[in-house]
Image: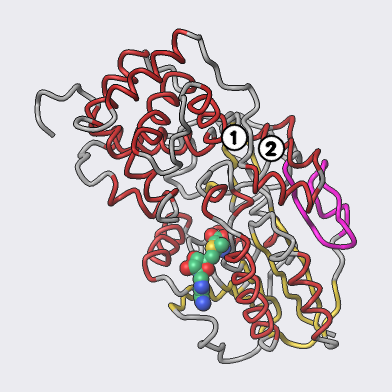
């Protein structure tokens, strides 16, 4: 980056590239980071670029409404000026960046282009003392979809949850929680720490006593119960949060995932926690186990719309067509996995999705097609206070644990082979 650009311009350029990757190319934010931040050497610059892009995606509808209120002719959605204004405004209005720094670092990115327009719109909004609403506005298509599926109270809770960063949930390998960690336990082997807590340096990390996992994501493995003397397959296992839970519950686990790089993280997690699992790099649509097992956890690939607080890109790039395609894949995986279970064995199906097509409808189709399986209803005493089973399945929606900091959206169903 040349010296005559204001300091900090490179991180804004990376943020613009990230937004472009998500909004125009439909890529996940995390997958776009390496490419977008290629000229940033420092970790904190990368983190700042990521934070600007993520906050813009959380606030996109409101940022665009402000931009539209200050332009005579509506800027096209993909106009460079709109992208630059979003980045300048999100810094000034949501990230406490001084106005001068927010705009000067962005103007150099539109040199030779709509510089005057960007400067004029930004200055007009600052003179007007524009603000963002306390509760972010969901993208209209998402709001309509979730209102239809879950009602307007849930859609409103989802919007509220976008305004605050999620807390930090730790899951422990044993019942004893090491001293020196302050938090609230919502379940055994769980501790919720204040939002913004840095993981590095927390008691017990180096010793492998815990890992980071949202309370919701910890539920599927819990619903398989005690594992002593039982074999389990963890299908679609990487990076291994649920594998570690199953291993620490005593299961003899085999973790299967198609992604070598994600399995490298699973292996690191197992090394750090000194927990044991067999690991198979394989596509579950091709692979099969040498013998049937007593328990299967299928945490299937999904739209991930349940983790929109951490990954706000899903709000903008997941379309109904992708949801329908994912649901077909999930049905096929579930049908295949079911054949690997012993009679009397237990199968848990989960997705971090807020779309009924990937949850309730997959479970219903499975039960309709497999008379050798029955729903094994989840009971109230298996769940943390504040969530209830719904017709024997676990559906965690926005608004759950709201006073304690919320939770990821999840679907979990448990089946027994008759
Ligand atoms: C929701 S993530 C799993 C998270 C994991 N269960 C955990 O708790 O850490 C879905 C995983 O499915 C894997 N996957 C996708 N398609 C697959 C396939 N056909 N066979 C095996 N794994 C697959 C992905 O690589 C990804 O790691």
Residue 400 screen position, x and y as percent? 76, 41
| Count of labels in the image | 2
In the image, residue 27 above or below residue 238: above
The colour scheme used to paint the residues is: secondary structure
Q: Residue at x 77, y 71 (%)?
A: 363
Q: Residues within 10 Å of mark 2 (few under 14, many from 20)?
A: many
Residue 230 screen position, x and y as percent? 68, 76
- Which quadrant holds the N terminus? top left
**What is the quadrant of residue 42 in the picture?**
top left
Residue 405 screen position, x and y as percent? 67, 33
Task: Tell me which numbered mark, 2 or 1, is placed earlier along the sequence.
Answer: 1
Tell me the magenta residue range: 379-398
User: Which residue lies under the disc numbered 2?
Assistant: 406
Q: Is mark 1 within 8 Å of ligand 1?
A: no
- Which quadrant holds the C terminus? bottom right
SS for callout 1: loop
SS for callout 2: loop
In the image, residue 378 above or below residue 344: above
Label 2 to label 1, Cα distance in Å? 8 Å
**What's the mark number on residue 167?**
1
In the image, residue 389 above or below residue 369: above
Q: Residue at x 64, y 69 (%)?
A: 324
Q: Is mark 2 within 8 Å of ligand 1?
A: no
Seen as rendered, the residue at the extreme bottom is 290
In the image, residue 316 above or below residue 103: below
Depth check, front residue: 177 or 82: 82
Magenta stretch containing residue 380, yes or no?
Answer: yes
Depth check, front residue: 325 or 188: 325
Q: Residues within 10 Å of mark 1 (few under 14, many from 20)?
A: some
| CB-based contact (under 8 Å), mark 2 and mark 1 | yes
Seen as rendered, the residue at the extreme front is 73
């Amino acid at each position: 980056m040349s010296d005559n650009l204001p300091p900090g311009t490179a991180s804004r350029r990376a943020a613009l590239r990230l937004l472009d990757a998500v909004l125009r190319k439909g890529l996940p934010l995390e997958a776009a980071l390496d490419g977008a931040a290629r000229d940033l050497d420092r970790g904190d610059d990368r983190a700042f670029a990521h934070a600007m892009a993520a906050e813009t995606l959380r606030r996109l509808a409101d940022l665009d409404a402000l931009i539209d209120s200050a332009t005579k002719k509506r800027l096209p959605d993909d106009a460079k000026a709109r992208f630059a204004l979003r980045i300048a405004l999100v810094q000034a209005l949501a990230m406490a960046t001084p106005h001068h720094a927010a705009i000067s670092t962005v103007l150099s990115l539109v040199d030779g282009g709509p510089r005057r327009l960007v400067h004029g719109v930004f200055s007009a909004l600052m003179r007007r003392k524009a603000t963002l609403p306390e509760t972010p506005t969901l993208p209209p298509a998402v709001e309509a979809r979730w209102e239809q599926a879950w009602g307007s109270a849930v859609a409103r809770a989802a919007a509220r949850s976008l305004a605050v960063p999620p807390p930090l949930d730790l899951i422990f390998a044993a019942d004893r929680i090491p001293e020196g960690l302050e938090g609230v336990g919502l379940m055994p082997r769980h501790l919720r720490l204040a939002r913004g807590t840095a993981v590095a340096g927390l008691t017990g990390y180096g010793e492998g006593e815990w890992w980071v996992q949202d309370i919701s994501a910890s539920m599927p493995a819990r619903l398989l119960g005690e594992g002593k003397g039982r074999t389990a397959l963890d299908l679609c296992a990487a990076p291994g949060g649920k594998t570690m839970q199953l291993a620490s519950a005593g299961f003899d686990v085999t973790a299967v995932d198609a992604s070598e790089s994600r399995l490298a993280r699973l292996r690191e997690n197992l090394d750090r926690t000194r927990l044991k699992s067999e690991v198979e790099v394989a596509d579950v649509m091709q692979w099969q186990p040498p013998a049937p097992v007593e328990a299967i956890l299928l945490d299937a690939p999904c739209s991930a719309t349940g983790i929109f607080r951490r990954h706000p890109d899903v709000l903008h790039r997941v379309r109904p067509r992708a949801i329908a395609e994912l649901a077909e894949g999930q049905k096929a995986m579930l049908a295949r996995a079911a054949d690997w279970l012993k009679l009397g064995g237990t199968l848990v199906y989960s997705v971090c999705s807020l779309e009924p097509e990937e949850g309730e409808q997959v479970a219903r189709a499975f039960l309709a097609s497999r008379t050798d399986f029955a729903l094994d209803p989840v009971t109230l005493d298996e769940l943390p206070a504040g969530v209830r089973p719904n017709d024997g399945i676990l559906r965690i929606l926005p608004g759950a644990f709201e006073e304690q900091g919320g939770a990821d959206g999840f679907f979990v169903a448990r089946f027994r082979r008759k």
